[in-house]
Image (cartoon, helix red, strand yellow):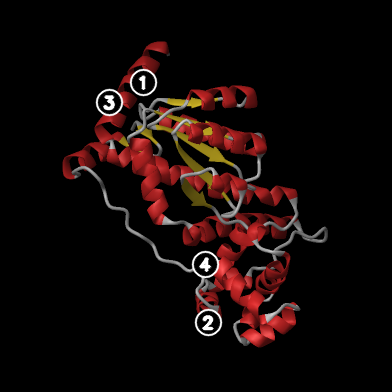
Amino acid sequence: MANFSGIPIEYLEIKMKHTQNKLPIREISGNGCLAKIRSAYTSLSTAERRVADLLLSQPLEVIHLSIDKLAKKSNVAKATVVRFCRSTGYKGYQGLKISLAQDSPPVMQYIQRDILPTDSPSIITRKVLQANIEAVSETLKMLNYTEMEKAIEAIINTQRVGFYGVGSSSPIADEAYQRFIRMGLKCVYSSDPHVQINLALSFKEKDVAVGISHSGCTLETVRCLDTAKKNEAITICITNYSGSPLTKVSDIKLITSFKETGFPIEKMGARVAQLAIIEALAVNVAVQIPQRSSEHMEKLRTILKELM
C-alpha cells in the first residue's frame, strides 16, 4: 500500500471526503516544568541559573521548600527567585511549585541517567533508549500547540518552503525536505552553507524558511533565517532553547526538550525530538491537503514503476 509520511493514500482519500477546510488540532495538556527550565536556561542570568541548577538537580526536594529557603539554598536573593519564576513562564513561586509537583513521575525518577564507564551494555542500551523516550515525552509537554497550528497553516499556504541546518542538524533538514517534497510542495534544501544563504536571499513574502538547530546558536542557520525574514518570508525554528538567537529571528517557534548530560551519543535524543516535530508537521499537512498529496504520490509511484 503506497503511503507518504506514514499515511496510506486510502486513509487520506477517506479523510478528504469527511474534512472541510481546516482540521482542528486536539491539544494535549502538560506542565513540563523541568523542560521549561532547561529550555530557558541559556537566557537566564548567572544568579537565576543557580536557582535552575538546584531545581533541575533536586526537584523533589524543592517542592517542599519555601521561597526563602530556596533562595538561601541557591545562594541568591529572594527577588532573584521571583525573577527566575517569571523568566521561566510562571507568575510566581507558588505556580512554579504546583507545576513542578505535577510533573511526570517517570521524569522525576530518571533525572540522573548519565552513562558511566562501569555500565554494562544492557544498562547503556536502556539509558540511551530511555533518553530518546524522555526527549519525545518532554517535547510533548513543552510544545506550544498554537505555534504548531501556525506552522502548519504557513506550510500549507506557502509558495515555497526551505529547510536549513548544518552539522548534525543537516540530516534532519534533509529528512524534512524529503517528507514535504513527496506531498507535492515546492521545497528547497542544500547541505552547503553558501548555497543555503543564497537560497535565503531568494526568499520572499509567502515563502517559508525552517531553521533547525538544537542549540539555536548555529551562526549559519541564524543568518539564513534572518535573511529570509528581512525579505518578508515566514520563519520557523525547531530548537531546544526558547531564548536562543534562532528564536529571535523566527516568527514561529517549535521548542523541543532534551536534557543534555555530556555523553556525545546521547545527543541523538535531541535529533529524535526534532524528527518527531517534523513528523507531526508532515502528517498534519498531509491530512489537510489529502487530494493534492495523494495525486502527487500517485504520479510519483507511476513514474517509479516505469523506471523499474
Secondary structure beneath dot 1 equals: helix
Amino acid type shown at disc 4? Gly
Amino acid type shown at disc 2? Gln
Q: Which residue is mark 3?
A: 295
Up-down: is 226 above or below 240?
above
* C-alpha gap between disc 1 and disc 4: 46 Å
For discs 2 and 3, the disc positioned in front in the rendered view: 2
Amino acid type shown at disc 3? Glu
Q: How many numbered circles does the render carry?
A: 4
Amino acid type shown at disc 1? Leu
Residue at point 54% right, 50% down?
273
N-term mark: 3 or 1: 3
Q: Which residue is mark 4?
A: 89
Label 4: how many residues lie within 10 Å, few (<14), some (14-19) or many (20+)? some
Q: Quadrant of residue 42?
A: bottom right
N-term mark: 2 or 1: 2
Label 1: how many residues lie within 10 Å, few (<14), some (14-19) or many (20+)? few
Up-down: is 267 above or below 93?
above
* C-alpha gap between disc 2 and disc 1: 56 Å
The x and y percentages for residue 219 are 66, 38
N-term mark: 2 or 4: 4
* C-alpha gap between disc 2 and disc 3: 54 Å
Contact check, label 4 and label 3, Cβ < 8 Å: no
Contact check, label 2 and label 4, Cβ < 8 Å: no
- Mark linked to residue 94: 2
Secondary structure beneath dot 2 equals: helix
The x and y percentages for residue 196 are 58, 26
Residue at point 49% right, 47% down?
276
N-term mark: 2 or 3: 2
Q: Which residue is mark 1?
A: 300
Q: Quadrant where the N terminus lies?
A: top left
- Mark linked to residue 104: none
